[in-house]
Amino acid sequence: MSVGAVSRSVYQIATEYDRAPLAYTLSAVAAVVYAFITYTLVRGGETARRAALVCCAAELVGVLVVGTWTVIEPSAFPDATVWSAFGKGYLFIPVLLPVTGVVWLRKAGRRG
């Protein structure tokens, strides 16, 4: 998800930013969050686990807020974000990934 979101947002911001600045900025934010979560999981340790848990929760809030917003008021986003319609353009992985991450990270914290 990190590579796909980063690639898409960089291309959209570089070539079409005027068309949908909010959508493309939100996609870039999602890309940064995905990359940071990946980094923290690779790094390991309790502090990294907590940081990943906070980021997964923030990502889930973003997906739910933007997903709901794009369903209720589609005209607010002239182009889709990673989070549009709860990640429909990405096979709903953007909504499933943070849920899975939160569950996994909470279990890992109880074991540790």
Image (cartoon, rainbow, N blue to C red):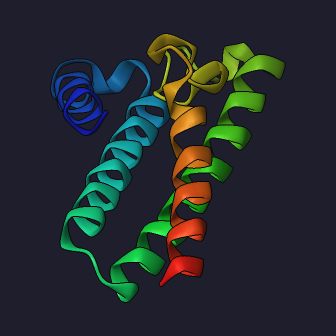
User: Residue 110 versus residue 86: which sits nearer the camera?
Assistant: 110
Query: Which x, y percent locates residue 105?
Result: 51, 65
Does residue 25 appear left or right of residue 61 in this picture? left
User: Residue at 61% of width from left, 60% of height from top?
Assistant: 57
Query: Which x, y percent locates residue 41?
Result: 29, 64
Query: Which x, y percent locates residue 97?
Result: 51, 39
User: Residue 101 versus residue 89: which sits nearer the camera?
Assistant: 101
Residue ranking furthest to the front: 111
Does residue 59 appear left or right of residue 7 in this picture? right
Residue ranking furthest to the right: 72
User: Residue at 77% of width from left, 30% of height from top?
Assistant: 68
Specify the quadrant of the image occupied by residue 13.
top left
User: Residue 1 versus residue 45: which sits nearer the camera?
Assistant: 45
Q: Is residue 101 above or below residue 87?
A: below
* Image quarter (top left, top right, bottom left or bottom right) of the N terminus: top left
Query: Which x, y percent locates residue 93?
Result: 50, 27
User: Residue at 39% of width from left, 18% of height from top?
Assistant: 19
Does residue 64 appear left or right of residue 46 in this picture? right
User: Residue 47 versus residue 35: which sits nearer the camera?
Assistant: 47
User: Residue at 71% of width from left, 40% of height from top?
Assistant: 64
Q: Is residue 12 above or below residue 42?
A: above
Specify the quadrant of the image occupied by residue 83.
top right
Callout count: 0
